[in-house]
Image: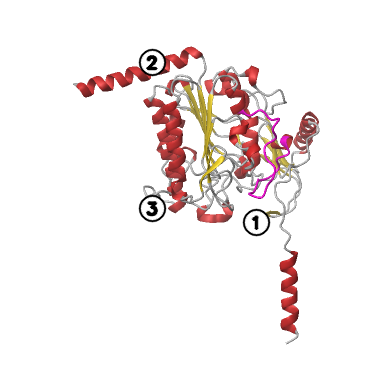
Amino acid sequence: MKKILLIAALFTIAANVSVAQKKTGKPNIVVILADDLGYGDIGTFGATDIRTPNIDDLAKKGLKLTSFYSSSPVCSPTRAALITGRYPRRLGIDHVFFPESFTGIPAEEVTIAEALKGNGYKTAIFGKWHLGHHRQFLPLQNGFDEYYGIPYSNDMQGVVYLRGNDVDSIKVNQKYTTKTYTDEAVKFIDKNKDKPFFLYVTHNMPHVPLYASPAFEGKSKRGLYGDVIEEIDWSVGEVVKALKKNGLEENTLVVFTSDNGPWLIFDIEGGSAGPLRQGKGTTFEGGQRVPAVAYWPGKIKPGSVYDDIATQLDLYPTIISLTGSQKTQTTKPLDGEDISPVLFGTGKRKADEFAYYSNGKIEAFRKGDWKIRLPQADIKINGIVVVPASDTLLFNLKTDLSEKNNLLKTNPAKVKELLGALEVFNKKLGNTPPALVQRMPSDDSHIKKRAERAGKSSSNK
């Protein structure tokens, strides 16, 4: 009897919390970002050899976005765009920050976290940051109340856990990173159940090197990569459970997506782009079209599917609108738009254009169903040619999702239309800042000289 009364009391508390939050008119926001997760790595997006019941359930009970884009085919620019709502070129962030980088996200940018914090929200990020690791660039200086995670990619030198601005541990057992971030996220939800919050969970996985905890190792049909994805799926489930336990599920928007496509050069450890061409590091669809689902019980119609363009740039203005944070948002131009009508099934996204940036340059442009790729030299990743040089390419993505058929010669009017739209886009974008210095080569001339001397010495013998 006592046990029954205790359970009833807990449900009452949870219900009261939910009612209290609803009265504020401020929903909670949870954004979960995987790293290098492919379009073909999730069940609801076609994977048959990886079990993702929790993410699939979000899609089943919420909205699946099939034409959702990250703003770059690599990590840092995407993350900058997601939390500012602005193309990374506007910030001068063209590529990836490294441990030797002395630059980071510009101080004048107003992040989602800063805008929401100014509107009474508690804010936290658990996981990979990758927008600069010197103190002034870290999450606590960019609107977040809490941070725990690895500040850049898990394959870089000096992998450490930071707690806030300080090193918490230099001994990082990466088998437990996904679990560690999940535990932190759940504790944050429990602690802030009586106030509106923005929770940003940014997994280091499945970026290589891959690690899964013992509970998931050897369980997937796709080897270690699949194990990693199944653990991320478990993590999503734990976050949703925490929301339910605290009576917050019906007052929380949950978005799950990836920062870019899969790193295909790592073959079985690099993920799958499904039907899409290429992957990370390229501006073909596999590099930037990413899986995405949105979940909000009572707000988003179960089983909804949206096939038109939407982007991670849209998250900023949408979250601002949903939370009533217009007074604290940036005054700088935004490149996304409020897609609340898409979420709630009341309308479509107004704009139908998207610019595919790589290394600060537009390599391709989409308008409606059509995509044009500008002439390009060989595309290399780590010195390996992944895409041979090509002249201008034109694709109809509605009929040719895999970008196999170049329709350039038979559609001159469409080429002219797209190039004209691209010119208008560039004029609208206006002047952009110089690229931040994100990597500086070491001076190894002394090593070369030593090798030369050694070579001469051996040849004289």
Res 450 seen here: yes
Instruction: Give the residue at the far top of this rendering.
Output: 23
Residue, disc 2: 16
Answer yes or no: do the residues labelled 3 and 1 have beta carbons within 8 Å? no
358 horizontally vs 188: left or right:
right
Residue, disc 1: 382
Residue, disc 3: 218
Q: Amino acid at mark 2?
A: Asn
Res 348 seen here: no
Cα gap from disc 2 to disc 1, whole angstroms:
54 Å
Q: Quadrant of the N terminus?
A: top left
Q: Quadrant of the C terminus?
A: bottom right
Region in magenta: 91-112
Residue placed most toward the observer, 300 or 452: 452
Sequence-wise first label, 3 or 1: 3
Label 2 element class: helix
Sequence-wise first label, 2 or 1: 2
Majority secondary structure of magenta residues: loop
